[in-house]
Amino acid sequence: MSQITTKDRSDSPIESGATKSRSRTAVDRFLTTGALVVLFTIFSITANNFFTLRSVLSLILQTSTVTLMGIGVTFIIITGGIDLSIGSVIALTGTIAVMAADANIPIWLSMVLGLATGVVCGAVNGLLVTRLKLPPFIATLGMMMVVRGLVLTITNANSRPAPEAFGTLGNGSVFSYGQKFPGIAFPVIIMIAAAFIFHFILRWMRIGRYTYAVGSNEEAARLSGINVNRVKIITYVIGGFLSALSGIILASRMVTSQPNGGIGYELNAIAAAVIGGTSLMGGSGTVAGTVIGSFIMGVLTVGLTMQGANYFMQQIVIGVVVIGAVAFDQLRSGR
Amino acid sequence: MNRGRAGATATEIILKVENVSKSFPGVKALDQVSFDLRRGEVHALVGENGAGKSTLMKILSGVYQADEGVIHYKGSPVKFRDATHARDAGIGIIYQELNLIPHLSVAANIFIGREPLTRFHTLDEKKMNADAVAILARLNLNLDPTVILRDLPVSKQQMVEIAKSISLDSEMLIMDEPTSALTESEIDELFTVIHSLRNRGVAIIYISHRLEELKHIVDRISIFRDGRSVSTDDYASITMDEIVNRMVGRTLENKFPPKRNAPTGEKLLEVKNIVRAGVLHDISFDLYRGEVLGVSGLMGAGRSELARAIFGADPIDSGDLTIEGRRVSVKTPADAIGAGIAYLSENRKEEGLAVKMQLSENVTMANVPEISKRFGILSRKQEMDAAAHYVHDLGIRTPTLAQVVNNLSGGNQQKVVVAKWLFCNSKVLILDEPTRGIDVGAKYEIYELINALANEGAGIIMISSELPEILGMTDRVLVLHEGRLAGTLSTGETTQEEILNYAAGLMNRSEGNPSGERT
Amino acid sequence: MKKLLVILVALMLVVPMATLFASGATEGSGATGASEIAVIVKTGNSGFWQNVQTGAIAAQKELQAQTPKLSVTFLGPQSESNVNEEINIVQSAIDRGVKAIVLAPSDVTALVPVVKKAKEAGIPVVIIDSLLTGDSSNYVSFLATDNDAAGRACAKTMIELVKAKTGSDTGKIAVMSYVAGVGSEIGRVGGFKDYIAKNSKLQIVTTQYSNSDQVTALNQTTNVLASNPDLVGIFGANEPTAIGMGRAISQAGIAGKIIAVGFDGSSVLANFVKDGTLQAICVQSSFNMGYLGVKTAYDVAIAKKTVPEKVDTGFVMATKDNIDSQKVKDVLY
């Protein structure tokens, strides 16, 4: 029953609000970037050989795949979903590509097959969420198990070596000058390219706008004529594609298929997105934030290892950072 | 049903409200209201939306505190600090939305927060269930106390709510629209319980929009209008016409902008035989260019459902839409938008806006392709131009076009939604409670906007619970009753009383005359 | 659309069941019950366990000379963690009255009751690979790699190789382990560290845990090598860890410059030994587990002999020199 007492109280302070929201995202970005710089500086001082060109390039290489997965899951989380099948998809797509290459299919085509497999996995996730209306947590949890079972079945759980040429994508680099400069690794180039492309898609393309709209208010988006199901499926397909890209890069780095690999990677990807400011409630998140988030994770892991920190302590530190980053965000936005 | 009862002689006054006033910023919700309630009576409280009934109930149950005036309860003045205070004093309230936990048993719901414990401080389920049976028996209810609440029909759940109040030894019970979710036979059951409570000496305030059901249970009736108490009478001594007259009273002047041009007579939208099983029954009407067509009806009559059906937001079983002479197939909101139909939902924040997104992004949300014509790439410039255009045209007050919508006032938010639909070149705008939650000044601007849109040739369907708004703004009114079109009235020739009669099901098109008696 | 969905969902439910049924049927084929020895392992889907099968089949062929009707069946759940499925497989072996069971329990306690049932049904059980808790009289013999001994052997090899290369047993080494605190890891890595400490001046600078993930092992090894350029040796304590470690060594371009010892015998690791990335791998004799497991079961159930309570199935230290010998080929997978 509506009544005259429901007076809108947000009436008066609109003028003072100014560009609060935009400046706040800028502040957020500044803070997370700042945290990254601080961590990097600390490790440069305390960890042996951390601040060398070779180590930094190696750090970027090691972080590139988490970044790719993180970007994919960022799209999904913005719509209010989640993807727990990333690790399994990584194992399956890498394995498919290696098996194809092993069967004398051209390397590029093998990799395309791997990517296609990832797209199919993503589409299945999307269909489970939209058509069967399963909660994303359950749909992708189920897919995590199904896909893992699939890859174990087709490989008998055996790691298999790939043809040497398969390793080029993961281990090759450009601008390499022998020992002086190890070059920029292909996976790093792929990561940078993907970051720009998906930033552009999320920020400047129709589908990106729809992604935010669906996550912000699904019903409003639907009533605005947006095909909500299609948008969700596309985000899961993007997630599947980027997981597959990671899976192929990792298989290529190892020059091996790894049916048991990738377990738990989804949690790193989700953590990277969340540290980078993506809200698990949906509606907010950026590619740039996720890139920074995954580098915060990467610097911590590599730095602590190189510092010679006890492995068990590393776990504690990383956990504290994840909790701290999100708690900080909550406290600030909760004002 | 039988109005005779044992305790009819009880006349002790349990509650006396004297000159109570309550203001909210900009609005005087209650103005010197007086009212009294006797033990063992069912006292109806009626009035239009915004008459002040709910505010008074919230004061009586401790949710709000009165600004001035005195409330005497059981002979002494009281001021309830909060809901618990009122409850402990013996005042129970049963809201439209039940305050129960669906996953718990009946007994657990009745005793929630004060579960009996054994001496080992574990739950004493045995005692709880036995006590629950005893309380239910007092209401002549034979319910298994261990049944999980959500497995019961709504009417039984309501009984559990009542039982919960009884178990608190409530001497006074407030029921706010208790029948709105019930079927005919369930209503009969509820009335039986109300009778037995009354016979037990419980005082009951009964709030309802369904005037026709009052005759079954009510002893006295108080009528509220515009925050004042207009009258209190024995129900037997007042006629339905008098009730409706007093509810409506004299309308305030200058609440609405002057009338605009008359509709052109060119048919814009034809709705034919819309059916949605159990919700909408064979509804047909026309909308003309430049017309504002009101839709009136009680809660649950199917007003929003009709809008959602036309807009493709809910699936329909059958029905045809014709726009400007062309048959259109509308299965999804996207179809409707493509055909030039827009729907401003009554729940602005839940269904109309992405409140965390920017103003400009909300304006373009329903027509993103318009600003991303090349390869799906958004043009920031086109987006800003569009937003700037509507901010200027509609007079949206915002510091920047990038303002997050959540930080705008209700009226400005509503204008953003209007802008969103104008940006789709909508010809038919369905406005569902367009002025809900908006203060008086902003309301006037929305009315002006509606008139301007109609003058420019749009067709407007305006759903409203506020009859003055319907009368002040529309050319014709569709009145719905229980999912059926009860009547189509010409606004200039009708009155609030007539609309209410149609809405209450006391009249309909085929009969055309008031029928106070229903069988 | 709705109908299609219903069919799809129904298929989703039916297909996995059919697969289970089919796999059970094929793997269990030839089970006569009359003179059957059932070999039940943690999973049928891995090279390690298939080597166990190879050993079991070799034993079967040998023993068929004495008992022509002898059949050996090889069964296992789809994945290692599927304990319930393994219990069911054991139960069904009991139900069809096999002569003996060779079991690799995938859980130290969960399979105790069903093993006890087998004993009560008069079916002797030989445990291979992993320990089973409870009353040890429930089974007749326990055959496994002595992880402690294997770890010590790796340490011994490490010390010898470092000495051979640098002329002394000093310097820094790193341990790349897999999952902290699981039974085999405590024995294997514990034995390694203990032997190093007692028999050399080598200093262990770090222990990393890869959680048996190749890429994690690759990254960890890369980082350890970067921050410790003077490392003389490194030990990768299980298959995925050793693979990641080998990959990191080869990418860092220091193959042969550092003494690297791995564990387990997959073809990828064997190739690392052949190309000099790893100097040695310690290969558990999974072949022996199958071979000796079936033989022990046969001795108890059919030949009615007494058998030892505990048998070390042994391991083989494979280096570039012996990698092509038959002895090593038998244990690689």
Image (tube, coloured by chain):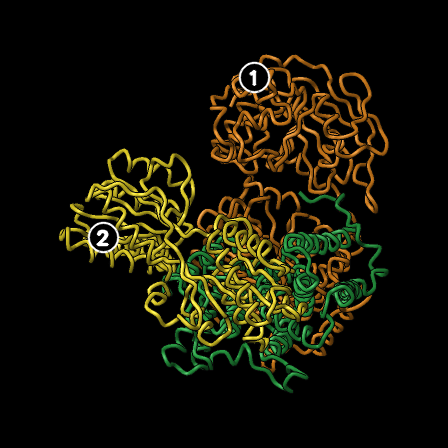
Residue B430 marker:
none
Against B264, residue A327 (above or below) is above
Residue C25 in the image: state x and y as whole percent. Answer: 23, 54
Q: CA distance from mark 1 to mark 2?
A: 90 Å
Say yes or no: labels 1 and 2 on the same chain.
no
Compare residues A206 and B202 and report the one nearer the observer. Answer: A206
Q: Which chain is green?
A: A
Going by the image, does C75 lie left or right of C211? Answer: left
> Which residue is painted at 75% across and 34% down in the image?
B63
Q: Compared to A25, does B251 lie above or below?
A: above
Q: How many marks?
A: 2
What color is chain C drawn in?
Answer: yellow
Question: Is A265 placed above or below B221 here?
Answer: below
Residue picked out by circle 1: B4
Quarter-wise, where is residue B498 in the image? top right
Q: Quadrant of the N terminus of chain C?
A: bottom left
Q: Quadrant location of residue B458?
A: bottom right
- Location of the C terminus of chain C by quadrant is bottom left
Residue kind at label 2, given as amino acid type: Val
Q: Colour of chain B?
A: orange
